[in-house]
Amino acid sequence: MDGIEDIMSFTHTPAGRIAAAGPLSAAEQQTRVDLAAAYRLAALNGWDDLVYTHISASVPDEPGHFLINPFGLAFDEVCASNLVKIDIAGHIVGASEHPVNATGFALHAAVHAARADAFCVMHLHNTAGIAVSLQPAGLLPASQHALRFHRQLAYHEYEGLAFSPAEGERLVAHLGDKSAMLLRNHGTLTAGRTVAEAYVLMATLIKACEIQLQAQAGGMELVLPCAAVADRTAEQLYDGGAVEGTLEWPALLRKLDRIDGSYRN
């Protein structure tokens, strides 16, 4: 991937600040609301990991700018207004009272830079996802949820805590054109054309992992669909590449609004 070393060079340096940003566009405000909602929903589902892991989204009409959570806030404290705008090098754009975890953004930066369709990148340390990533065969075609990722799930081997430019190249090569990945011994990743798509893909992947683990806990041999059925079902679920989450997202936002609508602030 051309330019990955420059993109990833901030990994071991703190984020700086660059020129002030202008007033928010309607598109950016909507992205902020959607991204804050994704953080709140992740917290509601117990997918958060203290103040670690991230969900990042591109800023509409501002190439090279992204939104990310303030480092040190819990996922259920994230709202539209406290999301921090950064550039591809992790530098804060405009004014923010919050720092960002530039090192944590390194993985996201690699995917955003490599994939024009990766509007939203969601990376979690979900327990079920990590547990399935430890299994040599990874995610089995054991459920309808898992079949959404049949032959469409990428894997990346664990290389340690520090995320280097060279690892960034390997990770995006392993991801290819796929929208979901299991990072061995580490976590899950989805890349969506919208925040809604990244979230719904993650929810489906996590449920598939949970089903597999619960089935394996019974100690019996699993009944798996034959290859022809798995291939046909996966094609049906892929639905010609239609953007996912369009139907589910408004319902999820209504759910959040009933619980606590402060994510919109």
Image: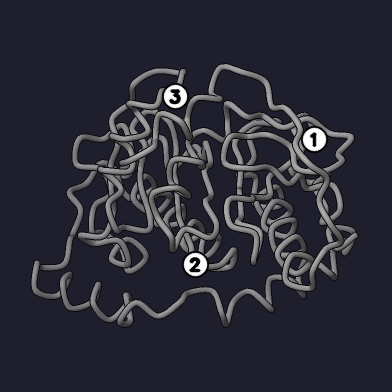
Of residue 162 and residue 12, the one placed in the foreground of this image is 12
Q: Which residue is mark 3?
A: 163
Q: Quadrant of residue 54?
A: top right
The residue wearing badge 2 is 193
In the picture, measured across the screen, residue 65 lies left or right of residue 236, that is right
- Quarter holding residue 230: bottom left
Describe the element under mark 1 as helix, strand or loop: loop
In front: label 2 or label 1 = 2
Do the numbered discs 1 and 3 sit on residues whose CB atoms are within 8 Å? no
Q: Position of residue 100 (x, y in %)?
A: 72, 32
Amino acid at dot 1? Leu
Q: Amino acid at mark 3?
A: Phe
Q: Position of residue 9 (x, y in %)?
A: 49, 25
Q: Is residue 169 left or right of residue 5?
A: left
Name the residue rendered at 32%, 75% in the picture.
Answer: 238
Q: Provide the secondary structure element on which disc 2 rests.
A: loop
Residue at 33% x, 43% y is 172
Sequence-first disc among 2 and 3: 3
Disc 1 designates what residue?
73
Spatial CA distance of label 2 from label 3 is 24 Å
- Say whether disc 2 or disc 1 marks the residue closer to the N-terminus: 1
